[in-house]
Each structure stands twice: as C-alpha cells, then as structure tokens.
Image: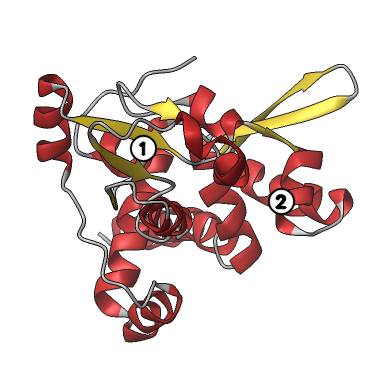
Amino acid sequence: MQDRSEALGQFKEKLYEQFGVLGRAISSPRRLELLDLLCQGERSVEHLADEMGLTSANVSQHLRVLKEARLVEATKDGLYMYYHIADPAVVSFWVGFRQLAMSRLAEVRELLRSFQSDEEFEAIDPTEVQQRLAEGSIYLLDVRPETEYRCGHLPGAASLPLADLNDKLGEVPTDREVVVYCRGPFCIMADEAVRAMRERGIKARSLKEGPMEWRALGMDLETN
C-alpha cells in the first residue's frame, strides 16, 4: 500500500510539473501577444518582430519557449523561419483564456473601455451576419492585414486592410450596410474602420467576433 501511495504521489508531481511547462510558456506578456498574432495566421520571425517593435533575436527567444511547450511549430523557407500554431486546440485555449480574463479581471474590461470609441457603435452578431449574407443585404469587410485574411477569413468577406482604407474607401459599396470585423473583441481596427466609413456617409457597424471566435462557435472559415 505504501509503494502504491508513493507511486501515486510521484505521478501527480510529474503530471503537474508538465502542466507547469505550459504555465511558464504563457507567463510572459510578450509570448501571449505572439500567441495571439500566430492564432491569426502564420508569420515569419521578421514579420512578428516588426509588428511588435522587437528585435528578431528577442522574438526568436520567446518563440523557442512557446515551441518547447508545443504551442507553436516552425518551418524553414530559405533563409526565413515561419511559425504557426501547433494545433487548433491551441486556438480554442487562447479564445477561452481571453474570455476568462474578460470575465474575471475588471482591469481588462476597463482597458478595453478606455480604448473604445466615444461613440457606441451598434454591433451585429454572427447569426445575423450569416442570415444577411445569404440575403445579400450586407457587405462583409475584413480590415486585418492581407496576410491574415489569406490564412483564414469569414465566408463571403472581402479584404480591405485598415492601413489602406482611406485610399480605397471608394471601392466600398454604398447600396447596402457594411459589416466590419478584425481580430476579435480585443482589437480596435474594426471600430476605427466603422468611424472612418460613417464620416464618409457609409452605413457601417462592427462584428466583435473575429475568425478565432467564429471558428470556436463551430463555423467554418475560408482560405486563400
């Protein structure tokens, strides 16, 4: 009986030690940001470094920790190393993690409020988006960078990155309502786009769910 008890104690110790590998991997705010970006689509080290304002060496260090925890994987193409999420379960984990942070941490909710527009843009929900897309009564617009759009976007969505919006706003149809989305509820690109469109007299509102949330709801994405 004593041997069995000792074996059980060792088993539990080793089990939680392995859980700790994941905990340590996501203990850095920078690694959480990397995980969020990679959930949007595959990126090179250089691309990640540029978007985060870090050196490639610093980003590579963080990515190694995530890779050792088997949260991300890497492929080499010539001189460049590209990273992507290791498994769809990682995306589900990240969506759940963000939702938990939103529900349990008042500081997160306060930060979001501080960066949201003074205007209250009426949001639209995924079910209504699907229904109205089928009717042809809305124009669905993805304002994330084009590389993210190609990795996976909502069915029927057109791509118009926020950085190009002012130059290409004339291409947005005005005969129906425009629904804009970006990376999800923690991203403000959609609100920025909606504000710019409304200033030009275009009827627009935002979809708070991004591709990650869409997929978590059991809905398919399109890829280019």
Residue nearest the viewer, comparing 98 with 7: 98
| Numbered tag placed on residue 76 in the rendering | none
Task: Write the residue at 15% across / 29% down.
Answer: 137
The answer to which of 219 and 201 lies nearer the viewer is: 201
Q: Residues within 10 Å of mark 1 (few under 14, many from 20)?
A: many
Q: In this view, does 199 lie to the left or right of 50?
A: left
Q: Residue at x 33, y 29 (%)?
A: 154
Point 35% across, 44% down: residue: 180
Q: Can residue 202 be seen in this view?
A: yes
Residue 71 in view: no
Q: Which mark is residue 211?
A: 1
**Horizontal side of residue 148 vs 131, given as left or right:** right
Task: Indicate which disc residue 51 carries.
Answer: 2
Of the residues shown, which amino acid type is indicated by label 1?
Pro
Tell me residue 220's x, y (percent): 27, 23
Element under disc 2: helix
Q: Look at 34% across and 70% down and name the residue there.
A: 101
* SS assignment at label 1: helix
Q: How far apart are marks 1 and 2 (CA)?
A: 19 Å
Q: In this view, does 179 lie to the left or right of 147?
A: left
**Residue at the limit of the structure toward the front, as seen here:** 201
Image x and y of residue 52, in percent? 71, 57
Q: Quadrant of the N terminus?
A: bottom left
- The earlier-in-sequence mark between 1 and 2 is 2
Amino acid type at circle 2 is Glu
Name the spot of residue 21 as percent of width and height, x first: 55, 56
